[in-house]
Amino acid sequence: MEENKNTTTSSQIEGRHSILEAFRAGGLIERLYVQKGCQDGPVLSILREAKKAGTMVDFVPKERLDHMSETGHHQGVVATLSAFSYSTIDDMFALAQKKGEPPFFLLLDGIEDPHNLGAIIRTANLAGAHGVILPKRRAVGLTATVVKASAGAIHYTPVAKVTNLVATMEQLKEKGMWFACADMDGDLMYQQNLTGSMGLVIGNEGNGVSRLVKEHCDYVTSIPMKGDIDSLNASVAAGILAYEIVRQRMNH
């Protein structure tokens, strides 16, 4: 892979040739920044590769790219590389088996804030979850910010990326897993049996769990709220529900 010759750090690459090569070599590109109005052949080729890879694309003004650029020669495109490699769901099952515990995974349906993702991975580790599953599209991946926000948990908790969250859930159901999603319209978490092999689904910061994913969950679970605002931060909700699962497992 040639992507490092145009950059001074390993987390960002610039220039059309370098970015196209990185995509074609299977590099883990998390986000692509393209100068607004750039629609020539090489840029369209890069956008095609980004679509195939499920990479998030932002169209930004030239000034933004000039500010981001470390080389001064971005040619209208800058990409950020994944700061960490992904695991597989098999790795998660192996970890659960090694610990002699029923599998406990967190599935994140469209988390976009890297600080939220890092905090959720940190919580997953502390709550004894065996892995975190992310969708490839419309969600943040393992960027440097996420790694930092996870406070080291990323080194111990497997994170996998899947093409289709619903299809993955169906495959996991065949392996005996049940799914609970966080939603204000659900039944109180204290009234549900969340023991056994469990996948906890946390939705997007603004829109919550998508309709299709929600329909494939066995439980719709709510957190009691007494305040004057109507929702919790996604990472806080993940923490509260993860620890309700921990509590039920300890009492089971």
Image (spheres, rainbow, N blue to C red):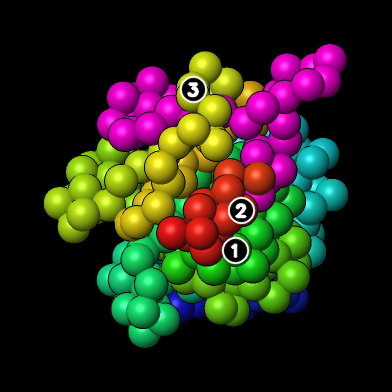
Q: Which residue is mark 2?
A: 243
In this view, the residue farthest toward the bottom is 98
Q: CA distance from mark 2 to mark 1?
A: 6 Å
Residue drawn 79% across the image and 41% down it: 64
Q: Earlier in the sequence, mark 3 or mark 2?
A: 3
Mark 2 and mark 1 residues within 8 Å of each other at the beta carbon:
yes
Q: Residues within 10 Å of mark 1 (few under 14, many from 20)?
A: some
Q: CA distance from mark 3 to mark 1?
A: 22 Å
- Nearer to me, 82 or 40: 82
- Nearer to me, 168 or 1: 168
Q: Is residue 113 magenta?
A: no
On residue 186, which mark appears?
Answer: 3
Q: Which residue is mark 1?
A: 127
Q: Residues within 10 Å of mark 3 (few under 14, many from 20)?
A: some
Q: Is residue 17 visible?
A: no
In this view, the residue farthest toward the front is 251
Q: Earlier in the sequence, mark 3 or mark 1?
A: 1
Mark 3 and mark 2 residues within 8 Å of each other at the beta carbon:
no
What percent of the width, then of the height, locates residue 238? 61, 45
Residue drawn 75% across the image and 61% down it: 149
Helix, strand or loop at label 3? It is strand
Q: Is residue 247 visible?
A: yes
